Amino acid sequence: MRFLKMDPFLVGLVCTILLATIIPCHGAAVPVFHWLSIGLISLMFFLQGARLSRAAVVEGLVAWRLHIIILCCTFVLFPVIGLAAHAMFPGLLLPDVWLGILFLCCLPSTVQSSIAFTSIAGGNVPAAVCAATASNVLGIFITPVLVGLVLRQHGAVGGNPLDIVYQLLLPFVLGQLVQPWLGDWAHRNKTLLSFSDRGSVLVVVYTAFSDAVMQGLWHKLPPAELGMIALADTALLATVLIITILGSRAVGVPLKDEIAIVFCGSKKTLASGVPMANVLFPPATVGIIVLPLMMYHQIQLFVCAMLARRFARQTREENKLAEQAV
């Protein structure tokens, strides 16, 4: 039930957007927040590398049988659906909003909520842990490539590709190098690091939306457009959920594995997505591009919470039948 409540992180994001709308940073504060955002993004990915055990990385990368299905959902199915939707309804959303939808489709899965929903539903939790880990590790490499392909196709201009290496990949690798020394400390201070990660995202969002507000974001984005974004996000999530459920059953995947595929394959990470957008897109467009992702984040929590309860009932019934058969 806690996933049906408003996500505190999302509340913080909404408050940050309101602050950026009322008091956007400008003038001499702009370069300060710009470099602060870069520093916090690098620190965030460094700490992600430091807290992720080497064994988890290896296991997430080599346990490929079930994971390859989930990775295909995350990095193939989503982009295909996004590109197909754009081709069929190019005028449905503003161009920058469409880029936001396509960017969302290129992101890796979440870790925490994917595992939590799989556990609630009675699914294959070890597989969910490995798949979510693999998605996030590989996403550092795959997402920039996918976004680059989309940007070239739509004539948009992205950031310097080397920024991905300097701000995301290099800090993550450095974190992995020092993991034997910092790993235990990171695990003991998960709450502090979670607060640090979310605080970093809020600073990035404030900086991005400040620039967007100064560029006239709310004049370019009418209220009806927000409704269309929510509709597009909901349709995207529903399509992926239907395909993953029907596809899993068509190939005869056990229920526990089906649950892991559904919940890991349908999620998109907000915590890593916002920093990535800040690196990949020009500052003037980041604010509007991350809007679809922010709305998708809350929609996926609400829908998957209800779906997890339904799967939990199926799991209990299947377990009862198995016990009776014995």
Image (cartoon, rainbow, N blue to C red):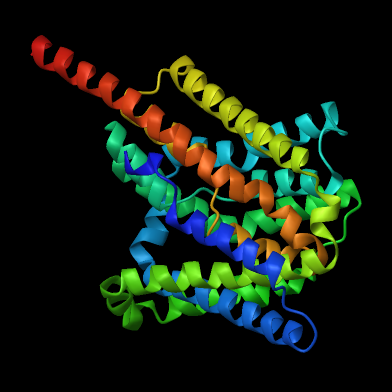
Q: In what quadrant of the picture does the N terminus appear?
A: top left
Residue at (29%, 71%) from the top-left corner?
187
Return the x and y of residue 170 as percentages of the image width and height: 59, 76
> Could you say which is closer to the camera, residue 264 or residue 27?
27
Image side of residue 112 versus residue 314, left or right:
right
Residue at (57%, 27%) from the top-left corner?
238
Q: Is residue 167 above or below residue 92?
A: below
Return the x and y of residue 36 as percentages of the image width and height: 63, 83
Is residue 320 visible in the rendered image? The answer is: yes
Return the x and y of residue 62 as percentages of the image width and height: 43, 51
Number of numbered markers = 0
Image side of residue 101 versus residue 86, left or right:
left
* Quarter of the figure with residue 225: top right
In the displayed orientation, state which residue is furthest to the right: 155
In the displayed orientation, state which residue is furthest to the top: 325
Q: Is residue 226 above or below residue 289?
A: above
Return the x and y of residue 25 as percentages of the image width and height: 72, 78
> Could you say which is closer to the camera, residue 206 or residue 280?
206
Q: In what quadrant of the picture does the C terminus appear?
A: top left
Residue at (46%, 18%) from the top-left corner?
251
* Quarter of the figure with residue 122: top left
* Quarter of the figure with residue 76: top right
